[in-house]
Every structure is written in structure tokens, then in C-alpha cells.
Amino acid sequence: MGFHTNNEEVGKVNKEVMIVTGAGQISMAIARRLGYGKKIIIGDKNIDNANRITKIMNDAGFDVIPVEMDLSSRKSILKMIKVAQNYGEISMLVNGAGVSPSQASIETILKVDLYGTAVLLEEIGKVIKDGGVGVTISSQSGHRMPALGVEIDEMLAITETNKLLDLEVLQPHNIQDTLHAYQLAKRCNEKRVMAEAIKWGQKGARINAISPGIIVTPLAIDEFNGPRGDFYKNMFAKCPAGRPGTADEVANVAELLMGPQGAFITGADFLIDGGATAAYFYGPLKPKNKS
């Protein structure tokens, strides 16, 4: 039947499996676009968030189960993968998990957004089905930071995951604040995707990153109405698009990257920010002290 019955019954049918991390609007938009006919595992540190997205999607005819998953823990990631493998081969990954500069400390940002993403890409790469595909959600922030140089880029790309947080560039005395930590994490995401694309490619699998700008979500609306609200409103008012983006527009890019039309795209990072980064470097959003 084309409708969801219950997880136990449906789980007995061997399906392709989509793993989705981070039970937010962007993750759900991508899952709804590409997850039909698949078993969808939604992992989130907050099981209530995962349960809420699961109900919305199951009520719309998808086949979803929630899993409590902490991206900063390899053990937790492996547990989620084991749950997913009970239902079939993992053919898709959508990584939308992470924390923002206003939500977390420098240490947490590096442990979740940088280390956790690297571990997830590594572990999924070991089990992804031949011909499988993944996307990880990065951020425009990684594009705002000055170049780090070839040597540091290579270290961020290929250092063993268990030694990644020991790199000198990631030590507290080299990080100015939570925004800087976030930018470093997202730059690392971009480099890890490039390095992992080589390994995934040995299975005919592909992995890419998407770097969104300001996307309207419940969390973003809170930010718009919070202390940094004027900063965000100014950013999207002065970018070429003149507005913030939507989760469905990010899903448009994911659909290209994860579908047959994107078969020649891997190891890439796609910036989708309404031109805000262009305006930051060469337009009305350029910082006054930036020459």
C-alpha cells in the first residue's frame, strides 16, 4: 500500500534507506523531496524534535522512524547506522545536524559541526550503497573567512578524525569567538567533503555540500526578533535577492545534487545565499574596514 501503517510492519520490508540528521526544516524539505519509497531514519539529539518531524512525515505517507543521535559522538553515529541497516542498504544521507554561533560554545561548535560532521561522512562512506549519494548542509559563513592556505586546508581535509580537534588552527587561543569557530567548522566541512568524495567514489557514490545563507525557519524567526535581528534583516534586504531563502529552495539544490541530473557532481560545495556573500565582498554588505 502507498500509506504508512506502522514501523514494525513496514520495517520487515527490505528498502533502500535514507539517513537524515537534524530534525529541522531544511532536513525535512529534502527528505520530503527525495525520501518517498524509502525507509527514512531521522536522527536528532532532541528526540522530541525527531518525533515531531516523524509524525508530520508519516501523516503525509512517508515511512519514517526517529532515533536519538548525538552528532558529536562516534558511538551515537554508529548506533544510528546500525538501526538504519536493520531496514536495508543505506543509499542516501542528508546531514542537517549542527549548532549555530548563538546557540553554543566554541568547544561545542567544533565538536559537533566540525568533528561530528567529519565522523558522519567517514562512517557513512564505509557503508553507503554502491551508487549512493549524500549532502551535508554547511553555511555561507565558511565562504566569508579569508583563505587559510594550502597546508591548513589539506590538514582540515585529510587529518584522521580522531586527531582533527588537535590541530593547532583549532586550538582555543587561535579562535576569536563562536562565529570564528563556526566559520572554521564550515570551511572544514567543505574540505572534508572534497576528501571524502574520493573515498565515496570508489563505490560509485557521491557526496556534496550545500552552503545556505539566511533561510526562514522557526529558529531563524527567533533570531530575526532577537538582539541580532537588525543585522540579519539588513543582510537579506541588501543582498541581490532582497529576501531570505526558504527550506524548499535548498531542497531544489539537493534534488539536483542527489538525483540523476547531478551524476557528474561530487566533492563540490554549492552556495545558495541570494547573493549575500557577493554583496559582502563587493557590494553594500562589505564591512567598512574591509579594503
Image (cartoon, rainbow, N blue to C red):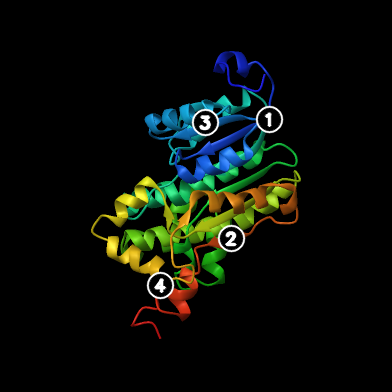
Q: Residue at x 63, y 45 (%)?
A: 134
Q: Residue at x 67, y 29 (%)?
A: 37
Amino acid type of disc 1? Glu
The residue singled out by tag 2 in the image is 270
Residue 268 in view: yes
Q: Is residue 179 above or below residue 285?
A: above
* Residue 214, quarter of picture: bottom left
Are the residues flagged by discs 1 and 3 in contact, CB closer than 8 Å? no
Q: CA distance from mark 1 to mark 2?
A: 26 Å
Q: CA distance from mark 2 to mark 3?
A: 27 Å
The residue singled out by tag 1 in the image is 16
Q: Is residue 58 above or below residue 107?
A: above
Spot occupied by residue 91 in the image (x, y as percentages of width and height): 67, 36
59 or 176, nearer to the observer: 59
**Mark 2 / mark 4, whichever is N-terminal:** 4
Determine whether, in the image, residue 159 is placed left or right of residue 112.
right
Mark 4 surroundings within 10 Å by alpha-carbon count, few (fewer than 14), some (14 through 19), many (20 or more): some
Q: Is residue 45 above or below residue 188?
A: above
Q: Secondary structure at mark 3?
A: helix
Mark 3 surroundings within 10 Å by alpha-carbon count, few (fewer than 14), some (14 through 19), many (20 or more): many
Q: Residue at x 48, y 29 (%)?
A: 54
* Residue 83, quarter of picture: top right
Amino acid type of disc 3? Met
The residue singled out by tag 4 in the image is 238
Q: Which residue in the rendered view is the most extreme toward the top? A: 9
The residue singled out by tag 3 in the image is 57
